């Protein structure tokens, strides 16, 4: 009589597979949440470092103002810089201005920037611009929006700003309050990390972008300082 080694029956295998599938379904959201939390933590850390650099830069200026990037300033520093990309939210001039305070350029890139566009990532910029010392082209696209420059406010922002005055935010994350698109490329839907003129950074829920430069202009052409770099959300 042949000796038979006892193995799993088909029903036993199906039960084991079912148990594994149930455990995977239960644990997957936890892993996804942990990964998202890690990205959010990294982004907060980046913006904390940048806010410290902003304050140190302001301390070194006579008027105590934050870095003020302009199209003309960028072209003077980098004559070959594309004239169509000199707005302050994508100008590599900011990285150059803060080089004494932030040595790691990766800090300038949000952890979820790739969801917005790959060209706003550190990896893309390193490949596209391996050297960015003048007169070579600088990093062209930042992974954060930087608001204290001519592209948004059109005015210098003092160091001792309001705790609600925006200096920087994650790239993407909100599309003009559109309920369909808002937050699809940020830290989950309707959430983004913002850095303010008093130096603090925080995760904000259900946000809108700050008033744009054109929205801050009064009919007579002057700047409405009640709107400059102020958020359009109702509750902070």
Image (cartoon, helix red, strand yellow):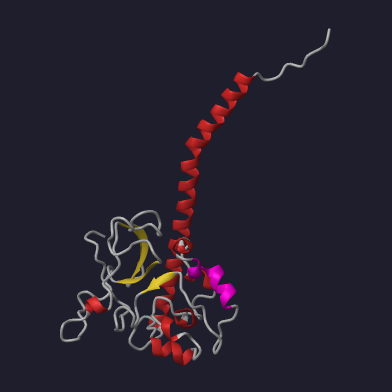
Residue 4 image position (x, y, % from top left): 78, 14
Q: Quadrant of residue 94?
A: bottom left
In the image shown, does 64 or 108 lie closer to the viewer?
108
Residue 153 image position (x, y, % from top left): 29, 79
Residue farthest along the top direction in this orientation: 1
Q: Residue at x 48, y 63 (%)?
A: 114
Residue 15 relative to residue 173: left or right = right
Q: Residue at x 50, y 70 (%)?
A: 119
Residue 114 vertical position relative to residue 223 in the rendered view, above or below: above
Residue 151 vertical position relative to residue 162 in the rendered view, above or below: below
Image quarter where the N terminus lies is top right
Q: Quadrant of residue 125?
A: bottom right
Residue 233 vertical position relative to residue 29 in the rendered view, above or below: below
Residue 84 image position (x, y, % from top left): 42, 83
Q: Residue at x 60, y 19 (%)?
A: 11
In the image shown, does 75 or 158 lie closer to the viewer?
75
From which residue to which does the magenta span run?
118-129
| Picture mark count | 0
Residue 124 drawn in magenta = yes
Residue 68 drawn in magenta = no
Image quarter where the C terminus lies is bottom left
Residue 119 vertical position relative to residue 6 in the rendered view, above or below: below
Magenta region, mostly helix, strand or loop? helix
Residue farthest along the left direction in this orientation: 219
Residue 129 relative to residue 167: left or right = right
In the image shown, does 209 or 196 lie closer to the viewer?
209
Residue 72 image position (x, y, % from top left): 40, 90
Residue farthest along the right direction in this orientation: 1
């Amino acid at each position: 009589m042949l000796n038979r080694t006892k193995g799993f029956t088909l029903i036993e295998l199906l039960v084991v597979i079912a148990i594994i599938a149930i455990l995977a379904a239960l644990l997957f959201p936890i892993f996804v949440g942990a990964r998202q939390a890690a990205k959010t933590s990294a982004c907060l850390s980046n913006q904390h470092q940048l806010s410290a650099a902003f304050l140190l830069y302001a301390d070194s200026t006579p008027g105590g103002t934050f870095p003020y990037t302009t199209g003309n300033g960028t072209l003077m520093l980098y004559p070959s810089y594309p004239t169509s990309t000199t707005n302050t939210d994508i100008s590599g001039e900011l990285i150059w201005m803060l080089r004494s305070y932030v040595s790691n350029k990766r800090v300038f890139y949000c952890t979820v920037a790739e969801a917005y566009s790959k060209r706003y990532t550190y990896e893309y910029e390193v490949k596209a611009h391996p050297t960015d010392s003048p007169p070579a082209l600088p990093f062209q696209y930042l992974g954060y929006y930087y608001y204290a420059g001519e592209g948004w406010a059109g005015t210098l922002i003092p160091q001792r700003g309001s705790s609600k005055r925006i200096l920087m935010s994650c790239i993407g994350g909100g599309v003009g309050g559109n309920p369909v698109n808002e937050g699809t490329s940020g830290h989950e839907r309707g959430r983004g990390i913002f850095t303010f003129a008093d130096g603090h950074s925080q995760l904000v829920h259900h946000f809108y972008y700050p008033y744009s430069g054109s929205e801050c202009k009064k009919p007579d052409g002057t700047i409405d300082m009640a709107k400059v770099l102020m958020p359009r959300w109702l509750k902070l």
